[in-house]
Amino acid sequence: MKTKILELIAILVALALTDTCRAGLNWEQTQIELHPAPGAATAVGSFKYKNTGDTVVHFKSITTSCGCTTAARKKDDVAAGETGEITATFKVGASTGVQQKTVRVETDDAATPVTILTLRAVIPQMLELRPSFVYWENSEPAKPKAIMVKAAKELHATSLKVSSSSNEFATSVSSAGQNEFKIEVQPRDTSHAVSAVLTVQPDNGGKPVYATARVVNPTISAQ
């Protein structure tokens, strides 16, 4: 009986020693939420780690969930006790709202070969259009229709610049109150189908948003 107990203790000690000899990255956090400043081109998050094991950890690969996100590391091998970080950069572009991107990290750690890092960026809507689509039926009177624009106060916009992809539509902009504007869109002729993309941009060079103007045939349902 005593021999069996000693054998069991030896096995448990061996398992404990095996565990302590394993490599392992201990992540400070695997999810980060960012709130980039209005107009920021990128949102950057740093995922910090420490090798709490006794052997070197080797990064096999680091991949991102989309082309708008990149991930960088300063080293391929992390010695026992070393710290480091993976920097994830999301290119904001024309994105708004909540954007969630992931980074897949693969290492030679047998216990945790894959770790998923999550970058969550909350991008404010700088210009809100109501509606973003105006249309006229074929041969309807060519009267102007309005698009109301609400600008975020952080944008500090005093006016808007509006351009049309087609000279079939004329546009004008007026103030409609604090941080609000009114865009009037008017077709030159409603006797034939035509459409245009309207580019709406703050006067301070902020990111543009887009609306659509269209003259449609009566048999075509406006979407």
Image (cartoon, rainbow, N blue to C red):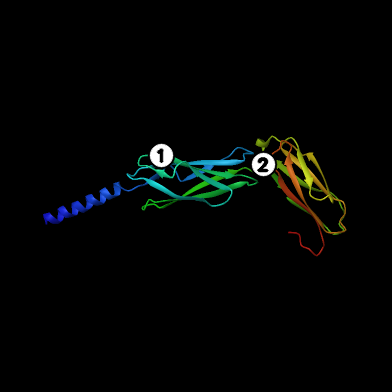
- Indicate left or right for 26 with 192 as reference: left
Percent across and percent down for residue 73 are 48, 43
Residue 216 has which mark? Answer: none
Residue 126 has which mark? Answer: 2
Task: Tell me the residue that label 1 is attached to.
Answer: 83
Q: Are marks 2 and 1 in contact (CB under 8 Å)?
A: no
Q: Nearer the viewer, residue 108 or 132?
A: 108
Check disc 1: other Cα within 10 Å, few if <14, some if 14-19, many if 20+.
some
Q: Quadrant of residue 148?
A: top right
Amino acid type of the residue tagged 2 in the rendering: Met
Percent across and percent down for residue 218 are 82, 63
Percent across and percent down for residue 169 are 83, 50
Residue drawn at x 50%, y 51% is: 63
Number of callouts: 2
Marked residue nearer the N-terminal end (2 or 1): 1
Badge nearest the viewer, 2 or 1: 1
Task: Describe the element under mark 2 as helix, strand or loop.
Answer: loop
Residue lying at the far front of the rendered structure: 76
Amino acid type of the residue tagged 1 in the rendering: Thr
Q: Quadrant of residue 3?
A: bottom left
Task: Describe the element under mark 1 as helix, strand or loop.
Answer: strand
Residue drawn at x 80%, y 65% is: 219
Percent across and percent down for residue 137 are 83, 58
- Indicate left or right for 60 with 163 as reference: left
Residue lying at the far left of the rendered structure: 2
Check disc 2: other Cα within 10 Å, few if <14, some if 14-19, many if 20+.
many
